[in-house]
Amino acid sequence: MKKWRLDFRIWHWVHATVILGLLGTVFLRKTFLSWRTNSELLTQKLSEINIEVTSDQAKTLATAIRAPMWEWHIILGYALAVLVVWRLLLFFTPSGKTNYQNFKEKTLYKKTVALSYIVFYAVLLFMAITGLTIHFYEALSLTKDTAHDIKELHELVYNAVLIFVPLHIIGVIVAESRDEKGIISDMIHGGA
Ligand code: HEM
Ligand code: HEM
């Protein structure tokens, strides 16, 4: 039997792509498509062609430029919510349990890795619930202030995702080059 069944591998790589996509949208929102930077640029450039705009008008323009990109945060957000549910279902399959069995016999390092995955899944569940709540706050009869507070939490916990992703990638590369040869290719072809 393969270590990683095909459905688990598909889940892993689709999930990795979606998480990187979500991080990409956040990166763009905070850098090239930041409304603060772009509203200043718009104000300056429009003034050069003798069009004066108020800061509110410049902000409206800058957020309109950002909007089509940010739609991808929501689309990928829906995908993430589905992937979290899919992962929960995978816990009922042998591949989904692999990292969490015979816990006592694991080395301290392997215990930490397994625990970090569980913490990461809890973080993702939180991100999916808070993200969907902010998006549907009106339908959920929440006030704008409450939605804003939830957004602050969503943004705070985002840092955990930002930490996990590089650590995980470095971790599996180090494992591959030391004592766990084939760990990465196993996640591609399934392993023995
Ligand atoms: C955003 C990117 C990624 C995320 C969010 C992610 C997430 C995860 C998670 C949560 C697990 C644990 C699976 C389980 O429950 O057993 C896992 C396992 C694994 N991932 Fe990733 N992954 C990402 C990218 C990558 C990349 C780029 C590689 C290869 C270079 C990779 C290689 C692996 C391997 C080899 C395992 C199995 C490790 C083990 O047995 O402990 N992942 N990944
Ligand atoms: C790994 C998962 C996720 C990460 C890392 C993430 C990250 C972030 C960050 C950093 C912000 C704040 C952006 C800013 O104000 O500068 C944000 C806002 C937001 N996210 Fe997520 N998010 C994730 C998942 C989701 C999901 C699943 C949804 C649900 C559809 C979602 C919907 C939203 C919404 C609606 C906002 C508020 C946007 C606004 O104020 O206009 N996010 N997200």
Image (spheres, grey):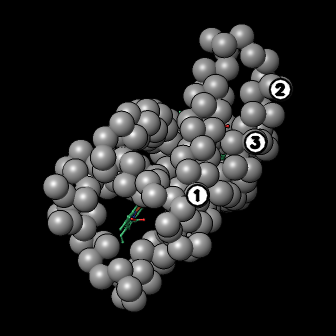
* Within-10-Å neighbours for mark 2: few <14, some 14–19, many 20+: few
Three-letter code for the amino acid on which mark 2 is drawn: Asp
The image quadrant where one finds the C terminus is bottom left
Residue at numbered disc 1: 115
Q: Nearer the viewer, mark 3 or mark 1?
A: 1
Contact, mark 3 vs mark 1 (Cβ under 8 Å): no
Q: Nearer the viewer, mark 2 or mark 3?
A: 3
Q: Nearer the viewer, residue 128 or 86?
A: 86
Q: Nearer the viewer, residue 64 or 51?
A: 64
Q: Nearer the viewer, residue 142 or 29?
A: 142
Residue at numbered disc 3: 153
* Within-10-Å neighbours for mark 3: few <14, some 14–19, many 20+: some
* Residue positioned 35% across, 80% down in the render: 180
Residue 152 position within the rendered picture, expressed as x and y whole percent measured from the top left: 77, 42
Q: Nearer the viewer, mark 2 or mark 1?
A: 1
Label located before the other in sequence (2 or 3): 2
* Within-10-Å neighbours for mark 1: few <14, some 14–19, many 20+: some
Relative to 79, residue 18 above or below: below
In the drawing, does residue 37 fall left or right of residue 7? right
Q: Nearer the viewer, residue 34 or 21?
A: 21
Disc number placed over residue 24 in the picture, else none: none
* Residue positioned 37% across, 55% down in the render: 98
Whether residue 132 is visible, yes or no, is yes
* Disc 1 Cβ-to-ligand 1 distance below 8 Å: no
Residue 75 position within the rendered picture, expressed as x and y whole percent measured from the top left: 43, 36
Element type at marker 1? Answer: helix
Element type at marker 3? Answer: helix
Three-letter code for the amino acid on which mark 3 is drawn: Leu
Residue at numbered disc 2: 145
Q: Residue furthest bottom?
A: 178
Locate residue 113: give its quadrant: bottom right
